[in-house]
Amino acid sequence: QSFLTQPPSVSGAPGQRVTISCSGSSSNIGAGYDVHWYQHLPGRAPKLLIYANMNRPSGVPDRFSASKSGTSASLAITGLQPEDEGHYYCQSFDHSLTFVIFGGGTKLTVL
Amino acid sequence: QVELQESGPGLVKPSETLSLTCIVSGDSIKNQYWAWIRQPAGKRLEWIGRIYTSGDTFYNPTLASRVTMSADTSTNEISLKMTSVTAADTAIYFCARTTYRRFDKWGLGKLVTVSS
């Protein structure tokens, strides 16, 4: 499958931990291509949250972390805050398609 | 602090050409890669293509026959043209700076509706 699959939604109470999965295949994540994560908050430009599987750009709190294993990746958010509410997307490269692909996005609701 | 802002008509008629500009401020566009990405309502983000400021381009093969990107270093702008649009091209269009197959800076996006 030359696409990335994410759960449509996740939710958690303030202070809790949530994880968002990103499932790919042997033509993208499983082939060793990096996974990147983006945060898209209402009314804001999408923001690079995690790059190259597990690295945080300057200014991103360490509440956000990510990992990659096999054909999947995962984003974890600890200490949930109301301002974390928005959409989160994973992204990688697919060598069958020869271009970058995105997950369908996960809407995070902070209860 | 680099900022990107998409601009252009928000309404385009079917079969006509969609034209958008990405105005980059806070950094020169020179010697960097820039991309266009779109998101139809309720659907996933779709990579349209990318351009290096020398003019080197690479487009999504599914859109390549209709897409042209250009870069103007004198105005620090990136442009997108998409011909023969249909309702399926209705989407929010984003410009982004791209490096190592990731996008480290995005614009707010521009909603383009294709309708008569």
Image (cartoon, rainbow, N blue to C red):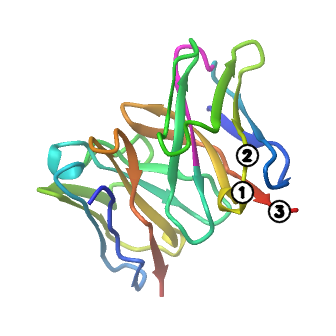
For disc 2, the marked residue is: B84
- The residue depicted at 51 percent of the width and 52 percent of the height is B46
Residue A101, percent from left and from top: 39, 50
Sort mark 1 into few (<14), some (14-19) or many (20+) by Cα contacts within 10 Å.
some
Secondary structure at badge 1 equals loop
- Residue A15 position by quadrant: bottom left
Sort mark 3 into few (<14), some (14-19) or many (20+) by Cα contacts within 10 Å.
few
Badge 3 or badge 1: first in the primary sequence: 1
For disc 3, the marked residue is: B115
- The residue depicted at 52 percent of the width and 73 percent of the height is A85
Q: Amino acid at mark 1?
A: Thr
Chain letter of the residue carrying label 3: B
The magenta segment: B29-37
- Give the alpha-carbon distance from disc 2 to disc 1, as whole Å: 7 Å
Name of the residue lying farthest toward the right: B116
Q: Amino acid at mark 2?
A: Ser
Sort mark 2 into few (<14), some (14-19) or many (20+) by Cα contacts within 10 Å.
some
For disc 1, the marked residue is: B86
